[in-house]
Image (tube, grey):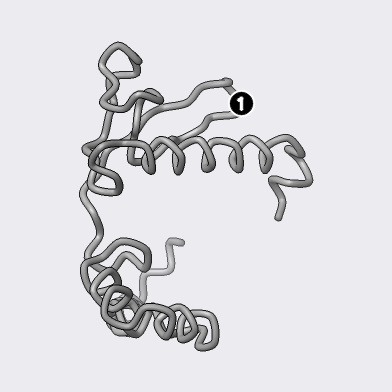
Amino acid sequence: QQCTVTRPGLAPMAAALAVELAIAVMHHPEGALAKADTEGDSAHASSALGLVPHQVRGYLHAFQQTLMRGPSFRQCTACSPIVREAWLREGDDFILKVCNEPSYLEDLTGLTEMHKETALAVAVWDEEGDNSGDDDF
């Protein structure tokens, strides 16, 4: 919310980049399986429309963009194998579940369980810290 107030031009810039990235992926010969381009030089582009990075990180304060490449996250609610398989298997019913059940993707991918485990680990860590009697913070 804050960035659209303090940086009103940021939302349209992000939207424009998202559209360009989506179109570049759609026109890439390997589609969504395209390898990430990170050279920053369109001469090395693997698509007729230019580079196809996995991520674009923007630094508005410096008017810079960095092309990123990273491994897929197995609990990703967009591209993890379990999400892709569910979508291929269930089609439109999958989309309806996603739209009608707010926690469906998190439950499906294991994010719900991961959040519970993280909260438990933090609680245990907090308890151990409380017993130390050291209140330097």
Vertical order, 51 against 69 (above or below)? above
Q: Quadrant of residue 31?
A: top left
- Is residue 70 toward the left or the right of residue 19 in the image? left
Where is residue 51 shown, x and y percent of the image? 35, 26
Vertical order, 13 against 11 (above or below)? above
- Is residue 2 toward the left or the right of residue 107 in the image? right
On-image quarter of the N terminus: bottom right
Vertical order, 99 against 63 (above or below)? below
- Is residue 72 toward the left or the right of residue 100 in the image? left
Residue 9 can be seen in this image: yes
Where is residue 42 shown, x and y percent of the image? 35, 15
Residue depicted at 33% across the width and 83% down the height:
90
- Is residue 79 toward the left or the right of residue 13 in the image? left
* Mark 1 element type: helix
Residue depicted at 21% across the width and 49% down the height:
71
Q: Label 1, on which residue? A: 61
Where is residue 4 shown, x and y percent of the image? 73, 46
Residue 121 can be seen in this image: no
Residue depicted at 59% across the width and 40% down the height:
14
Vertical order, 58 against 97 (above or below)? above
Q: Residues within 10 Å of mark 1 (few under 14, many from 20)?
A: few
**Most foreground residue, 134 or 117:** 117
Q: How many marks?
A: 1
| Amino acid type of the residue tagged 1 in the rendering | His
**Most foreground residue, 42 or 67:** 42
Residue depicted at 61% across the width and 43% down the height:
15
Q: Quadrant of residue 103?
A: bottom left
